[in-house]
């Protein structure tokens, strides 16, 4: 018959009490946090899934910020395009009214000042900024896109922002797209995108002519009129032509600007349609993310939130177990040395 030593009994008692106290402590921590998982070992598989869901929530939060940033850019761009449409429409109305011989040269000269003012408004809109970034400079967002002569100093870069997982949208239009267009746009069939028309030679530079010299000085940051943009229909140039025609009392030249103003208006309408399409895709992406966040929140709740009724029932039961353990071992732990020697 084997003999159970006192040290062995005490170790068994200590192990049993510590195990029950650890269980009680774990239940009390879950009761305080109302979480079913307080450490990875509670549910290893569920913990991995929970971390994945948290990562998706963080990603969606950043995507939402990106979407709001993109909407700010696009909304401001749309406002500029709308203002340009009004400017071009007003210039066209003036051209229609002044194309007849009813007005005197003095009246036309006075109205030319209004066209010059409209050009200044268009130039200010072309250099529109959000914070320190210019809207229409492409990637050169810290560089003003237009100088006082209407020369373009930006590039053709489109800034793309990720508004949902692997879904990137352009948030800007370049000054070239908005303010310039080819003359062959007049010959486009109805419904064709005028921005899809390209010259045979891709424009890279514009040569600025020095009024005091007969030589051309090349500026690498502007459009090259000899490289295909000699046929461009610029908002600035058309307003200048109209102002000059009014000052010179040239009714035929005034009349000739009407077709070009129609082309410019069609281009601006097409650009507004493009902006609206991108904005709608961003809104759709945001709505999808909102629904996904709700589904993720529900799944996270099922993984990590504790069942309150079951949890507090387990706490009461474990409290009874711990109390019974103390009572069962009380006699052994309080034995005196004399009783042990008997």
Image: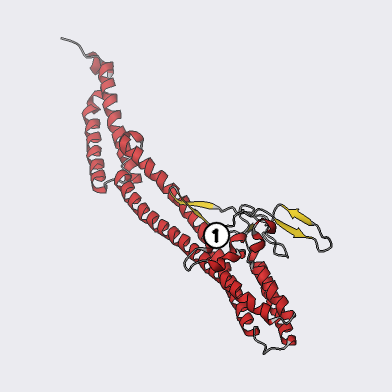
Tell me where residue 62 appears, x and y as whole percent: 48, 50
Q: Residue at x 71, y 84 (%)?
A: 108
Looking at this view, name the residue that lies furthest to the bottom: 102
Residue 252 versus residue 24 in the image, above or below: below
Q: Residue at x 27, y 32 (%)?
A: 20
Question: In the picture provided, is 75 more to the left or to the right than 25?
Answer: right
Q: Residue at x 48, y 65 (%)?
A: 273
Residue 25 versus residue 306 in the image, above or below: above
Q: Does dot 1 land on a helix, a strand or a loop?
A: loop
Residue 241 visible in rendering: yes
Q: Nearer the viewer, residue 118 or 219?
A: 219
Q: Nearer the viewer, residue 49 or 262?
A: 262
Colour setting = secondary structure
The residue indicated by pointer 1 is 197
Q: Residue at x 72, y 62 (%)?
A: 147
Tell me where residue 266 appears, x and y as whole percent: 53, 70
Within 10 Å of disc 1 (Cα), the crowding (few <14, some 14-19, many 20+) is few
Where the N terminus falls, by quadrant?
Answer: top left
Q: Nearer the viewer, residue 249 or 20?
A: 249
Question: In the picture provided, is 264 more to the left or to the right than 54?
Answer: right
Tell me where residue 315 appears, x and y as whole percent: 26, 41
Residue 332 image-quadrant placement: top left
Question: In the picture provided, is 172 more to the left or to the right than 123?
Answer: left
């Amino acid at each position: 018959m084997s003999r159970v030593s006192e040290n062995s009994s005490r170790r068994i008692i200590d192990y049993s009490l510590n195990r029950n106290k650890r269980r009680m402590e774990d239940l009390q921590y879950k009761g305080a946090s109302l979480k079913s998982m307080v450490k990875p070992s509670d549910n290893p598989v569920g913990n991995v899934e929970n971390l994945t869901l948290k990562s998706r929530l963080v990603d969606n939060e950043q995507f939402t910020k990106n979407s709001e940033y993109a909407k700010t850019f696009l909304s401001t761009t749309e406002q500029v395009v709308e203002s340009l449409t009004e400017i071009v429409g007003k210039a066209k109305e003036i051209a229609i009214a002044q194309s007849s011989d009813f007005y005197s040269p003095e009246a036309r000269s006075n109205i030319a000042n209004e066209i010059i003012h409209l050009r200044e408004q268009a130039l200010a809109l072309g250099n529109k900024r959000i914070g320190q970034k210019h809207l229409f400079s492409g990637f050169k967002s810290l560089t003003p896109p237009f100088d006082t002569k209407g020369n373009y100093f930006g590039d053709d870069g489109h800034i793309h922002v990720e508004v949902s997982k692997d879904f990137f949208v352009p948030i800007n239009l370049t000054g070239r797209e908005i303010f310039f267009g080819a003359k062959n746009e007049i010959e486009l069939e109805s419904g064709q995108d005028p921005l899809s028309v390209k010259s045979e030679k891709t424009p890279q530079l514009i040569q600025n002519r020095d009024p005091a010299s007969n030589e051309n000085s090349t500026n690498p940051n502007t459009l090259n009129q000899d490289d295909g943009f000699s046929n461009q229909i610029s908002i600035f140039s058309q307003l200048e032509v109209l102002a000059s025609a009014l000052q010179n009392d040239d009714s035929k030249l005034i009349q000739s600007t009407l077709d070009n103003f129609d082309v410019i208006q069609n281009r601006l309408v097409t650009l507004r349609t493009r902006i609206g399409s991108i904005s709608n895709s961003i809104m759709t992406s945001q709505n999808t993310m909102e629904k996904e966040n709700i589904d993720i929140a529900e799944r996270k709740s099922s993984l990590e939130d504790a069942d309150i009724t079951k949890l507090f029932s387990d706490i009461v039961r474990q409290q009874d177990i711990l109390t019974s353990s103390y009572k069962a071992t009380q006699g052994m732990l309080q034995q005196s040395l004399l009783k042990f020697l008997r």
